[in-house]
Amino acid sequence: MTHTRPATAPVTIFGPDFPFAFDDWLKHPQGLATLPASAHGTEVAVVGAGIAGLVAAYELMKLGLKPVVYEASRMGGRLRSQPFEGGQGVIAELGGMRFPASGTAFYHYVHLLGLQTQPFPNPLTPAAGSTVIDLEGQTHYARSLAELPPLFTEVADAWSEALAELGFGDLQQALRQRDVPRLKALWDRLVPLWDDRTFYDFIAQSQAFSKLSFRHREVFGQVGFGTGGWDSDFPNTMLEILRVVLTGCDEDQHLIVGGVQQVPLGLWAHAPRQITHWPAGTSLASLHGGATRAGVT
């Protein structure tokens, strides 16, 4: 399929090093694929009932195959939610908890199941209300960046300027337009420069941060912006960090009301409207008699 996207299209997780528009295929009225009738009912092993395994099993079932799902532990993998006993609906997320709006393929299944979402209360976002920053004995309360001392604005501006030095604007425009040749050309220039260099190396050597004090880098690592501090990511390759910010994974994040484990559990129980070979009302649960197979040994 070919799609023309305006420059104002939203950023989605359409990776510079893996430009496959899976979300476009999910929305296509003809589905992901068709198989010859002779293949219908063929068993296909799916090892692991995490979100990847259950998405694969769900889509294979729709094509007319018979996925056989094996799981050694709990269904859902790292998408696991635990209600508090007597907690009046309060849920503890024991794995994934915040999901960027740019994850269009993930939200395809969230919307398919009719689940509700809410903005995640990341620091300095409206959903957080007030953010408390306690740094070396000094406490700041703020609802937005503008309410913090100038040091924090200087750090935020330096981060934006440092990204601009890499050609961030051009990369993101190509990403919005899903212009694969342009995106690949821009990304390929960065790979030999940053593939073996760390995130901290990038920060320390950028012109934007070089003009500032070491204290600015320290605050960037300890506090950061959006989802919080970046210092635990300093040893990572810069390309990994660039991929995260380029595809909007660090901003506009949401939670799943009632717990994210509803997504894998919902796919297990959901009977798709369009399905090949299997009778209407078929679900992964019904194909398995209600339970996954034991773990693979």
Image (cartoon, rainbow, N blue to C red):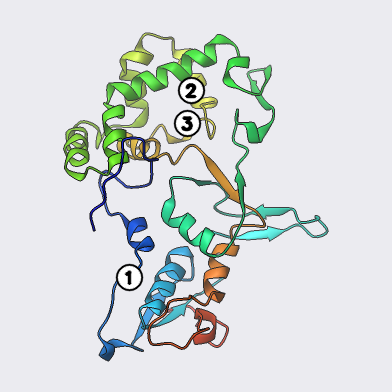
Side (left or right) of 110 relative to 148: left
Q: Residue 220, which numbered label?
A: 2
Mark 2 packing: few (<14 Cα in 10 Å), some, or many (20+)?
many
Q: Is residue 4 left or right of residue 110?
A: left
Residue 99 percent location from the top left of the image: 51, 48
Would you place residue 156 above or below residue 252 in this image?
Answer: above
Q: Which residue type does callout 1 highlight?
A: Gln
Residue on which disc 1 sits: 30
What secondary structure is marked by label 1?
loop
**Which mark is nearer the camera, 1 or 2?**
1
Q: Earlier in the sequence, mark 3 or mark 2?
A: 2
Question: In this rendering, does residue 198 appear at all?
Answer: yes
Asked if residue 193 is positioned above or below residue 136 in the image, the reply reads: below
Dot 1 or dot 2: first in sequence order is 1
Residue farthest right in this picture: 86
Real-space CA distance between mark 3 and mark 1, rounded to the nearest whole angstrom: 43 Å
Name the residue at 38% across, 34% down.
Answer: 235
Q: The C terminus is located in which quarter?
A: bottom left
Residue type highlighted by circle 2: Phe
Query: Is 272 or 267 nearer to us in this picture?
Result: 272
Q: Secondary structure at mark 2?
A: helix
Q: Is residue 47 visible?
A: no
Q: Is 117 drawn above or below residue 36 in the view shown?
A: above
- Judge depth for marks 3 and 1 and give the one in front: 1
Q: Nearer the viewer, residue 289 or 179?
A: 179
Marks 3 & 2, CB-CB < 8 Å contact: yes
User: Which quarter of the rendered picture does the N terminus lie within?
Assistant: bottom left
Residue visible at 32% across and 39% down in the picture = 176
Disc ID at residue 230: 3
Q: Label 3, label 2: how many angstroms apart (C-alpha)?
A: 7 Å
